[in-house]
Amino acid sequence: MSKAPLLDVSGLTIAFPGGTPVADFGFRVAAGETVAVVGESGSGKSLTALAIMRLLPRTARIATGTVRFQGRDLFALPEPEMRKVRGREIAMIFQEPMTSLNPVLTVGKQIAEVLRLHEGLSAESARKRAIELLDLVRVADPHRRVDDFPHRLSGGMRQRVMIAMAVACTPKLLIADEPTTALDVTIQAQVLDLLESLRRDLGMALMLITHDLGIVGQWADRVVVMYAGRGAEEAEAAALLGDPLHPYTRGLLAASPRLDASLHYTAGTLREIPGSISSAIGEPGCPFVPRCPLAQPSCRTAPPPLMPVRPGRLLACPPVAATLEPIDAAAVGR
Amino acid sequence: MLENRRLLRVLRRTVVQAVPTILGIIVLNFLLLKLAPGDAADVMAGEFGAATEETMVMLRQRFGLDVPVLQQLLAYLGNLAQFSLGQSPRYGMPVSELIGQRLPSTLMLMGMALAIALGIGIALGTAMALTAGRWPDRVLSVVSLIFYSVPGFWIGLMLIVLFSVKLGWLPSGGQETIGAGLTGIDYVLDRLKHMILPATSLALFYVAIYGRLTRAAVLEVASQDYVRTAAAKGLPPLAVTLRHIVRNALLPVTTLAGIHLGGILGGAVVVETVYSWPGLGRLAFESVMRRDFNVLLGVLLLSSFLVIIANTLVDLLHAWLDPRVEVR
């Protein structure tokens, strides 16, 4: 291990009165890298992000686990200290740009708010900076837009405003929770391009939560695959897409539609993973067992931990790991 | 610029709608009052103890009550067209003068009551929502239920018993200390002291309504995505609550407050009687008893104006609070 990661989540378990949607989950984000957290709806991606920000709904409880950010234990910080982290060191943008902005405040005021809070700017200089930020996120005509109310902007524009708000204080880490799910495909690419260029220019790390594997290949350095609140597989993006190991990852990839001129939907049905994620509830062993083609009796005893199987690669599937060549644990470096 | 144009449009629309509304109110009120048995001449005759046929005819002639109802209506409308509310047969003076004397007291009472109702109601509702399901919420819910269900006159009497009779802190009636000859700040304080009890009795019912409404609105707004965004910015809870939650939760409350203004005027009749407050409500009550319909019509006309003006103000306030309100 060369140096401490920027963000180190380990053993995170989030409990609700009705169950534990995130259990013993962990991953790391190094400074300046883009980590994609992938999984289907209900796999606990967003809850993990909210837990890092300590913004979980009141009914949720962090049962176990730690989140270290730049070496500090975020769960141990007093709330006023945590507020200084939010928006300044870790910023977050959300899935729904249509509802994530306050309808009765101009976008300029909403951007200025975070600048005045964390950087103590005056109203006037915060406004100036807000215009610059709108320009930075490529909103056309920022001088006029700064006084617009959110309902006058399109979804893509609003998401840009959200991004402007998030990067206003040049955070070290930006958590983007499905930032493009609600947008048109063409706008999606623009927004992701924007996030990527901001990440480079501002030296941020990016935690990109998505269920779209197409995004992963193009924009992520590393990928963490989540299933039912647990880590299934972790790898470099290219390695994961080129050679998925976990049966769930394989299923996900096989289920992704490919744009191929020779293929038409009549040529064959789109493959799906049988069953649904709700089958993981109450499963004592690997949560994927009910849907897994490789399931063995041993899978049902205890949830498998993420184990290093290749350099830079973790897998939580003993049956698959057994088929791989054994590796020298020291070379993995973890 | 754009903002002002939007507000102007709201204003224009309201005025266009107000004219037929007011005309309808006048005609309807006039005809309804004519349905009541007896007229000013009957009441006066009753008070004299006896009156000859000739006296009655003479009285009716003087008050213009001897012609058919439709003609009376036309005469009344004719007066109105000349901005005159007519004469009060009873007081022998112009109705506008009578109302003019009483209007400021009632407006002050209503304004104070509305301010108390909104101020306390919104604070109460926000406090209830923020502690929803826990004991402060429960206790305040019960308190607001009591405010809601107890009649205003009873609350008025009880407040008098407690604060005037037992504690002697506040005066029990009237709107100023008679003959004290106070000036300046002392005069203002004296007036305020006289206003606290009547305004509070008038307000408590509405405190309960605005409290419940604010509680529901705050709970709804608090679960909105933009509140989470505000928290993710690192804003402290108070700033999130005031800037992002309460600001949005105010929208339904302001609408309702505008509608209630007419109701508060109605409630003022009772409260003004309990506190011998020289206002419009008591004037209206007395003119009903005396069949002094010109005065009553004037009061009703004025109150419909008040309600329309209040609603316009609320519309403007609404358009200002909520930029999404676009006038079509």
Image (cartoon, coloured by chain):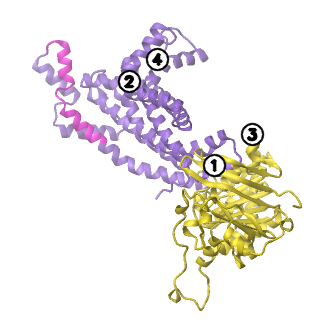
Chain colours: A yellow, B purple
Q: Which residue is mark 4?
A: B175
Packing grade of label 1 (10 A; few <14, some 14-19, many >=20) is: some
Same chain for mark 3 and mark 2? The answer is no
Q: Which mark is residue B152?
A: 2
Q: CA distance from mark 3 to mark 2?
A: 48 Å
Which residue type does callout 2 highlight?
Gly
Question: Would residue A333 be visible to someone looking at this image?
Answer: yes
What chain does mark 4 sit on?
B
Which residue is located at x 52 percent, y 18 percent? B191
Q: Which mark is residue A78?
A: 3
The secondary structure that most of the magenta stretch takes on is helix
Number of the label disc, if any, that sits on residue A56: 1
Pick out the residue farthest to the front: A297
- Please, what is the three-letter code of the amino acid marked with disc 4? Gln
Disc 3, SS:
loop
Task: Assess whether mark 2 and mark 4 are in contact (beta carbons under 8 angstroms).
Answer: no
Q: Is residue B110 left or right of residue A63?
A: left
As measured in the structure, the alpha-carbon distance from the residue carrying label 2 to the one carrying label 1 is 45 Å
Tags 1 and 4 on a common chain:
no
Q: Nearer the viewer, mark 2 or mark 1?
A: 1
